[in-house]
Amino acid sequence: MSVYIDEKKCMFCLKTKNTEYQMKADEYGVLKHLWYGKIVNTDMSYLLEYPDVGFSGNPYCAGNDRTYSLNTLPVEYSCEGTGDYRISAVSVIHSNGSNALDLRYKGYSIKKGKYSIKGLPSVYANETEAETLEIILEDTASDIEVVLRYGVLEKLDIITRSAVIRNRGTSTVTLNKAASLCLDIPYGEWEWINFHGRHTMERIPERKPLFHGIQESSSTRGTSSHHQNPSVVLCSSDCTEQYGECIGIFFVYSGSFQTQIEYDQLRQTRLTMGIHPDLFTWRLLSGEEFETPEAVMTYSVSGFSQMSHNFHKVIRENICRGKYKLIERPVLINNWEATYFDFDAEKILNIAKEASKLGVDMLVLDDGWFGKRNGDCSGLGDWFVNENKIQGGLGKLVQNVKSLGMRFGIWFEPEMISEDSDLYRSHPDWAIKIPGRQPVRGRYQLLLDMSRQDVQDYLYNVICNILKSADISYIKWDMNRSISDWYSANLSSERQGELPHRYMLGLYALLERLTSEFPDVLFEGCSGGGGRFDAGMLYYCPQIWCSDDTDAFERTMIQYGTSFIYPISTVGSHVSTVPNHQTGRITPIETRAVTAMAGSFGYELDLGTLSEKEKADVALQIKKFKKFGSLIHGGKYYRLSNPLKDNNALWSYVSDDKKEVLVHGVIFRTEPNMKRMTVKLCGLEPDGYYQIEDTLEVYTGSALMKGGMLLPAPWGDYTPVEFYLKRLEK
């Protein structure tokens, strides 16, 4: 049992293994937030004592009590227009043009198991794993009802949030904002971490103290974006990897989002997360309801590592689905950086032959196999095989690759359309563009209107035809531009503001159909690399191409930031050629492999161009990854250094029973006349004895965690680090 109700006090308490979340409806029916943190087993409303704060108005029901103000109290779901001037969670326009909403407590229900959200990805859990609390609020002057939903996964220290806005009146209302979560924290001094970036440099953590006013992390690109990730961390100023308080939140959504944090006049903190309101309106007719996407939160008193472990486990086990969510992934080779558009069946088969000799499991054919696609100006939408490149068709090529003992994967970019394509010439109205305006193009391409059922059906049919034409085991699902020019020929003028969210609903619907139809196919998400790396896509694709930057040095920083929220098993990472195609940097192949092993491992180069020694190295790397794969993907991941500040990037994987440890990393620069560097390990059994496999040296877990272990003496830049340790039985 994780949901506790004190009906006499009208108090609600959500308890997980280590945390407690409290709310209380007061004498006026206002649902207040009381506490989120360590288990306290006490009604924390005693802390909510407020003075008469100037220019903070008072609701009429409070009479002459000037200390009672919605502008100062911590509320569970904030509204516009009724005296709370801080950021709001919900905004509506009534039929008379007014925007006020004053939500008061109406009732609650408790259900076994975890709620689901129609048409949207969300955490799933059975009746033994979770409970759901629904709290019903209603407006004082209209027939709008809001249901706040809380999913509690007790053993995982996870609470999920979503809201349902219902129009129970007779007139149409318009939603202008519908956040999934509002979290008021009336106590503590907090800093925040957002994960910013750009194409080829995604999810870089940036930590700053809160300032008075509003700080924001958001995307209006129609995707979660390379530039900001839909996740955030609030932390105490003394929080480190192993110590201190932090609250982590991520959004299970792949479209435009907004996270806002307001540090108010009384040094209180409010955080909201949801669909970006700049690209959102929704008309609610009489009797209709709108369900928000889900936000997932956890609290840790043991620093960032515990927060990450909680998130990694819930994403791997309760968001990712299907055959591949927990099993080890195939080691693959992708032809993109080896050939780009310049290939034919013979060239692809030669890459496969070299790869099969070295132990690679799968060949993935990237962009350029379809339509009239010899560059990025044409062909998107025409998903039929270009037999000028692939003589004999896809079936023949796949059979030839399979005869080498390998599986076959293929690249799609289904959401896009080229103006130079048969599809565009037949259905120009399927493209997203505003009548009378020249559209913005990205990578020379436009977008298909995924809100349309006929578009979804077309894509479903052509993708099914390809998958049924040959034995294909993997799809790389790419998306190579931001979205603009929002307009659908299929929607009325009053509903054009609904298109961004309807686009996402259409995309999710198509992915649901395809992943259900082809359960044995591994889907990998991609958007110019990491431009749509979010929990929404992970619901359908258990791994995502982490970044188009394959430089081993840069990847340590990209993967460092990614690991705060997302598990290693979801990270697509490859060894590529040198000089690197994005930076020109030259790093040893051993270093590139160690970095790429922090994910779903593979190669993206022409193996035929390697020396015999390098080929032997590749064969050894693949054997190592297969040896350590279950530990890398299933073990607890620890960040042992900060590559944004330190002269190294170091991380480890520790098995749940603490019997196995794998330490990986890179020493960036060699300095002369320096003593050997050390690294302090984490998560070991203090009294256990650990033996390093290569040297047979034995140390106690306490020594390795308190004193540390010696790193190899570097020679040259970008020295790889690898240690495997096992705990001795005696």
Image (cartoon, rainbow, N blue to C red):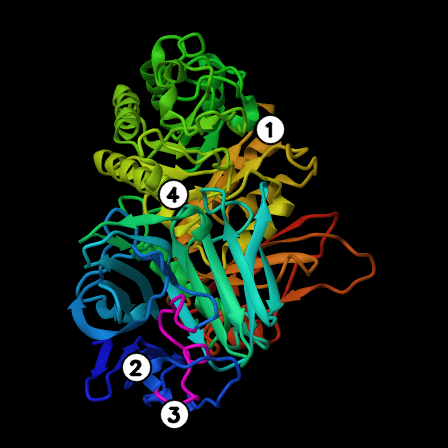
Q: Which mark is residue 46?
A: 3
Q: Nearer the viewer, residue 5 or 728?
A: 5
Main secondary-structure element of the magenta-colored stretch: loop
Q: Which residue is mark 2?
A: 24
Q: Position of residue 189 (x, y in %)?
A: 55, 79
- Rounded to the nearest angstrom, the CA distance separating label 3 from label 4 is 44 Å
Name which residue lies at 39% across and 29% down: 448
Mark 4: few, some, or many residues within 10 Å (few <14, many ≥20)? many
On whether residue 66 falls in the magenta region, the answer is: yes
> What secondary structure is found at the residue carrying circle 4?
helix
Q: Which residues are magenta?
A: 63-83
Numbered badge on residue 612: 1
What is the C-alpha distance between the residues marked 2 and 3?
A: 12 Å
Q: Amino acid at mark 1?
A: Glu
Q: Residue at x 29, y 83 (%)?
A: 28
Assign a secondary structure to mark 2: strand
Identify whether 364 is placed above or below 35: above
Q: CA distance from mark 2 to mark 4?
A: 35 Å
Q: Residue furthest right?
A: 673
| CA separation in Å, label 4 and label 1 | 58 Å
Residue that label 4 marks: 497
Q: Amino acid at mark 2?
A: Lys
Residue mark closest to the camera, 1 vs 2 = 2
